Amino acid sequence: MLKKIIAVLAGILTGFILIGLVEALGQYIFPVPAELLSSNPSFPEATEWIEAIPLEQMLMVLLAYIIGSFGAGFITTSISPGKSLALITGFILLISGTINVLLIPHPLWFTIISISLYIPFAYAGGIASIRMFRKS
């Protein structure tokens, strides 16, 4: 039981780290528009910020969710085999992603796509781990 809890926690941590790293890469590749920062020297409102983000950076965030969820499922299942644990990890990432889109206003298309990514890609990561480490 403890091994399963550790597996899920490690998967969640891995998912958050991977999402953060890919989002940081996206911000490096697609920096914040200078006109947004110059128009509001303190800090722009969240709606201004989201509206100013280029489509490429929004797609990079979706890619971060995909990579993070896949990695989370992969690590969870690598530590404690069982696809159901990858689903639990994906569900917890889904909850955190849902909280994110509820607290920060996002376009509707982004919200719908993002909340549909976590569980399937965590499950796919779990399947990939089982196939990779399965004893033949």
Image (tube, rainbow, N blue to C red):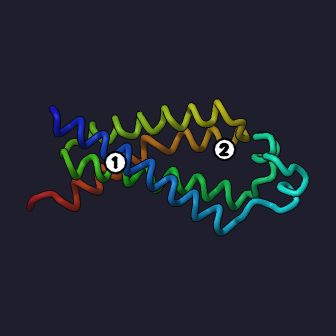
Left or right of residue 122, residue 25 in this image: right
Tag 2: amino acid: Phe
Q: Which residue is mark 2?
A: 110
Q: Position of residue 8 (x, y in %)?
A: 29, 40
Element on which disc 1 rests: helix
Kindly identify the residue that appears in the image at 58 percent across and 60 percent down. 24
Kindly give the residue lying farthest to the left in the view shown.
Answer: 136
**Spatial separation of the CA atoms under disc 2 and disc 1:** 22 Å
Left or right of residue 94, residue 40 in this image: right
Tag 1: amino acid: Gly
Q: Position of residue 128 (x, y in %)?
A: 29, 57
Kindly identify the residue that appears in the image at 48 percent across and 32 percent down. 95
Kindly give the residue lying farthest to the right in the view shown.
Answer: 39
Viewer-proximal residue among 12 and 86: 12
Element on which disc 2 rests: helix
Q: Is residue 8 above or below residue 28?
A: above
Q: Which residue is mark 1?
A: 73
Q: Earlier in the sequence, mark 2 or mark 1?
A: 1
